[in-house]
Image (cartoon, rainbow, N blue to C red):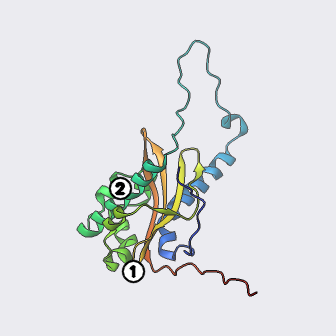
Amino acid sequence: MKDFSTTSPIGTLARGGALALAALFLSSAATAAAQQQQPAAQQQAAPVPQGTNVPPPAAAPVPGEMDLARLIWSTMVTIDNANGSGNYTVLRDSSATGFQIANDPARLAQIFAGLRASRIDLTTTLLTAPSYTAAPQLLRPDVFQVQGYFPLRPRAVVFDMAFQWQNGQWRLFGVSVEPRVIAPPQQQAAPAE
């Protein structure tokens, strides 16, 4: 199993990257606020009469190392294809419903304008495994976030992605991708004797 506890010299996401994830965090906050406003009686689940065959809610399977890398790689390729063609319909249509509602293709073209202008080939991320800056974390029972980078030269590709379990598969729920020059880690000086 991949050790997700590694850290890197990458700082926080740039302002443009944070905007791409804004819909994710705003929709989570709005859902929580709406649930707090409901009367307590409505928040409780209705009892299921005995003798009915109501299946329990399906738990989202936590993706393993290879499935996680596959999700990240496929997202990179989809974004690269959208940037190359200028058509963000496939990226939007293959994403989770919340992402689709928050982002029409024209908005996605605006969000990724800076990345498109950098002319970076995101398919080169397929040549290496992603490095993680933090362990994947659940934001909700059906949504997890993963952050990291691809250590490419001269510029690394930094990512912050969220995926939602929907219709039996993980779908893109929020994304930020940014090429960035990463300074090599500083080495500690040996103590003087």
Give me the C-alpha separation between circle 2 and circle 1.
22 Å
Residue kind at label 2, given as amino acid type = Ser
Q: Is residue 55 left or right of residue 153?
A: right
Image disc number at residue 119: none
Where, by quadrant of the figure, is residue 87 drawn?
Answer: bottom left
Q: Dividing the image into 4 quarters, which one contains the C terminus?
A: bottom right
Q: Residue furthest left?
A: 85
Q: Which residue is mark 2?
A: 74
Q: What amino acid type should be assigned to the residue bearing mark 1? A: Pro
Residue 92, image x, y percentages:
35, 56
Specify the farthest residue to the top. 51
SS of the residue at dot 1?
Answer: loop
Q: Position of residue 112 (x, y in %)?
A: 37, 71
Rendering coords of residue 111 (x, y %): 40, 70
Of residues 144 and 184, the one nearer the viewer is 184
Q: Quadrant of residue 185?
A: bottom right
Tell me the crowding category of disc 2: few under 14, some 14 to 19, or many 20 or more residues within 10 angstroms, Cα based: some
12 or 17, which lies in front? 12
Looking at the image, which residue is at 61% across and 56% down? 29
Against 87, residue 140 (above or below) is: above
User: Which residue in the structure is indicated by mark 1?
Assistant: 154
Tell me what residue is drawn at x 32 percent, y 79 percent. Answer: 117
